[in-house]
Amino acid sequence: MADRIPVVANLFAETPAGPRLTGSRCTACGSGYLPKSDVCHNPACDGAKTEDAEFGPSGTVWSLAIQDYPPPAPVKFDQPYTPYAMGFIDLDDGLRVLGRIDTDDPRSIEPGIRVEMVIGALAHDEEGNEITGWKFKPV
Ligand SMILES: [Zn+2]
């Protein structure tokens, strides 16, 4: 039986409300952090505390590039390699994150389109387990 193995631990989760990135937020100014930060890095903020926060799933493509050739390790992908779009996504709740854009036609993706986060396979290991991560699907 194949398993689903997170590509990185503690950065994302399937919550009862759906897929979310799991970071933190400053209790004073609201700045968001992924991965979690114990302190606020906003130079204009005197806040000393952060709390756990979830981010996503909705956002807008800010910028993107097509990964036309296989990326170097440790990036995981299935063979044969298929080009994909990598986008910077402005999440509606204030975080800008990098993620693969889940589409069969990467060249159809443009800045400004709306996307929604999903958790899915980025690749498979030798035993057929899914290596999972967050991705963004056009909506
Ligand atoms: Zn702050």
Image: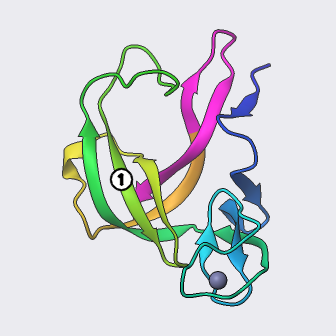
2 up-or-down from 33: above or below:
above
Can you give x and y, in whole percent of width and height, for residue 41 in the image?
Answer: 60, 72
Quadrant hosting residue 88: bottom left
Q: Is residue 93 magenta?
A: no
Determine whether, in the image, residue 82 is placed left or right of residue 46: left
Can you give x and y, in whole percent of width and height, for residue 57 in the image?
Answer: 57, 67
Quadrant in the picture for the C terminus: bottom left
Along the viewing direction, whichever of 57 and 53 lies nearer the viewer: 53
Residue sitting at 27 percent across and 70 percent down? 112
Which quadrant does ligand 1 occupy?
bottom right
Determine whether, in the image, residue 102 is placed left or right of residue 7: left
Can you give x and y, in whole percent of width and height, for residue 97 in the image?
Answer: 48, 59
Residue sitting at 25 percent across and 40 percent down? 66
Q: Amino acid at mark 1?
A: Gly
Q: Is residue 133 magenta?
A: yes
Magenta range is 121-138
Determine whether, in the image, residue 89 is placed left or right of residue 52: left
Around disc 1, counting alpha carbons within 10 Å, would you say few (fewer than 14), some (14 to 19), or many (20 or more)? Answer: many
Q: Tell me the SS state at disc 1.
A: strand
Q: Main secondary structure of the magenta part?
A: strand
Along the viewing direction, whichever of 100 and 9 lies nearer the viewer: 9
Can you give x and y, in whole percent of width and height, for residue 9 in the image?
Answer: 74, 41
83 up-or-down from 18: above or below:
above
Q: How is the image coloured?
A: rainbow
Along the viewing direction, whichever of 32 and 111 lies nearer the viewer: 32
Residue beneath disc 1:
87
Quadrant hosting residue 51: bottom right
108 up-or-down from 8: above or below:
below
72 up-or-down from 92: above or below:
above
Residue sitting at 54 percent across and 80 percent down? 43
